Image: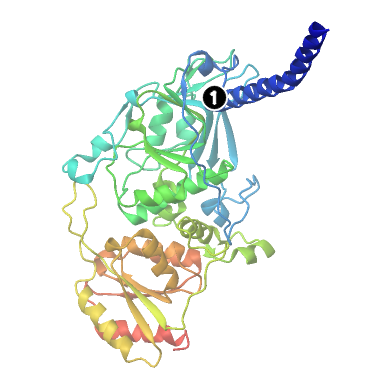
Amino acid sequence: MAGRNHHQSHGQRLRRLVPCILVVVLAVHAVSFALYLLLQSNHPPPNPGNPEAQTHERVREPSSRKPWPRLPSFLPWTADPSLPPRSCEAYFGNGFSHLVEVLPEGRGGGGWFRCHHSETLGSSICEGTRVRLDPALITMSRGGEPIHQVMGRKEEEELPRYESGALVVEGAAAGRRGPLVEPGFLDAHVPTNGIGTHTMRALLDSARVVPPGELHCSQWIEEPTLLVTRFEYANLFHTITDWYSAYVSSRVTSLPDRPNVVFVDGHCKAPLEQTWEALFSNVTYAKSFSGPVCFRHAVLSPLGYETALFKGLSESFSCEGASAQSLRNKPDHQKTARLSEFGEMIIASFDLLEDGIVPPKKTSNGLKILFVRREDYLAHPRHSGKVESRLSNEQEVFDAVEKWAKGQKCKINVVNGLFAHMSMKEQLQAILEASVIIGAHGAGLTHLVSATPDTKVLEIISSFYRRPHFGLISHWKSLEYHAINLPGSYASIPDVTNELGNILKGLGC
């Protein structure tokens, strides 16, 4: 009897223990599964279809992709083969309507490579998948150094020279091996256009095709990436042409987010690099990679010299700024809102749009006249740090304008636009708040691309620098533009204040 009772109590204890054991086992299993998922997210399992998985190449951790901001002047970038050559959209928008399949996508895997050609601009935006760039086959300085460390370095040391195979695209299993582009392709689709050192053309000339399994890389970049070569990287006008080319390249290739940028040049670090970082998701230098680097999707951005912003200095074409809304309602091939869209892209990158809207000027405390000044600054390793004056009595003119403004019936605040001492966000804020922008001909006036449509412009032009840059930008943006053409570089104070007075009358002052 006692044995039977003992057996029953033992069975009861087992029945009580079994649920506890099951709970513990399930808990251990859950923790193990969670750890497995965590490890798998950091180390994706090998995919037999991917050669890079077979060769154990390192995949870079995904970077933080920046979404495209909502822009008031945005218009679709759909390619239109029927777009008339030399129309505004052909110059400033998606005139890259001729698609050239350089390396078609194959059935057996591998990558592809294509170019979007613009007959109007005479240039191409090229893109490809499974693309490798080998820094060891590019001769140039490392790039990104503080300027004081590389003073005296020659410009030719900073520009890339490519050996064969600097760029490689993986073809299909049964595809060809050898040069990426056929003879005659470069002359037809990437002509020199009078550019002495056409680095994009040289990079394509170095490009080769290899079969699957031969695209050996030290790491893979998963995000879409622009390959950019800059020339006059410290000058705002030329840098804005590079920004514009990069922006257009991103839109033409329908990138879902703002891409990464790789500088395929060896320039030292410059203040304008911070704006590259604001505009795009990530910025780095080609020589910063320790070995051959592969891109899931790479885009070759044309040189800034090939944009309408630069070509307009030597080519005559009819194009006037207009609001995006007016063009949505009534398309016009002789009008454009693309520069306004781009200017909004710049200010949005510094969080200066309010809910996707350009904030109105605040005039309750008076109108603002922004006087853009020219200052000495150290532009590049070959520069003396001295900026050549375009207005010999600039300080005198500024002081006179300040004094004149205090005697007007309207309250006027004259802003001293010492841009070399201001952050980019502060510069853009000053541009947005100004009712009138005045200055001698100089790169700082390129900020007009971000000015609002109600901004008035007064450019003081020396006879030694009579160039159309800012009159053209004003026209392409539909800004009211005035100019004082000097017989030399000395400005008459009454001429300046009288012109300002006439401009202010139009503002009700």
Name the quadrant of the N terminus.
Answer: top right
Report the front residue among 236 and 262.
262
Residue 242 appears in the rendering:
no
Left/right placement of residue 2 relative to residue 262 reads right
Q: Is residue 467 above or below residue 50?
A: below
| Residue identified by numbered label 1 | 39
The percent coordinates of residue 505 (x first, y second) are: 44, 88
Q: Nearer the viewer, residue 378 or 389?
A: 378
Residue type at mark 1: give it.
Answer: Leu
- Left or right, residue 210 beside residue 392: right
Percent of width and height locating residue 35: 57, 25
In screen coordinates, is 452 left or right of 17?
left
Front in this rendered view, residue 91 or 478: 478
| Mark 1 crowd level (few <14, some 14–19, many ≥20, 10 Å Cα) | few
At a point 27% along the width and 86% down the height, the residue shown is 403
Say whether residue 467 is visible.
Answer: yes
Residue that protrudes farthest toward the front in the picture: 1
Q: What residue sits 45% from the left and 33% below the top?
A: 187
Q: Which quadrant holds the C terminus?
A: bottom left
Q: Name the spot of residue 52 as percent of width and height, x first.
A: 51, 18
Q: Quadrant of residue 13?
A: top right
Secondary element type, mark 1: helix
Total tally of numbered discs in the picture: 1
**Residue 249 spot, x, y in % from top left:** 51, 44
- Tell me the colour scheme of the image: rainbow
**Residue at the image point whose x is 19% and y is 39% from the top:** 153
Q: Is residue 130 above or below residue 261?
A: above
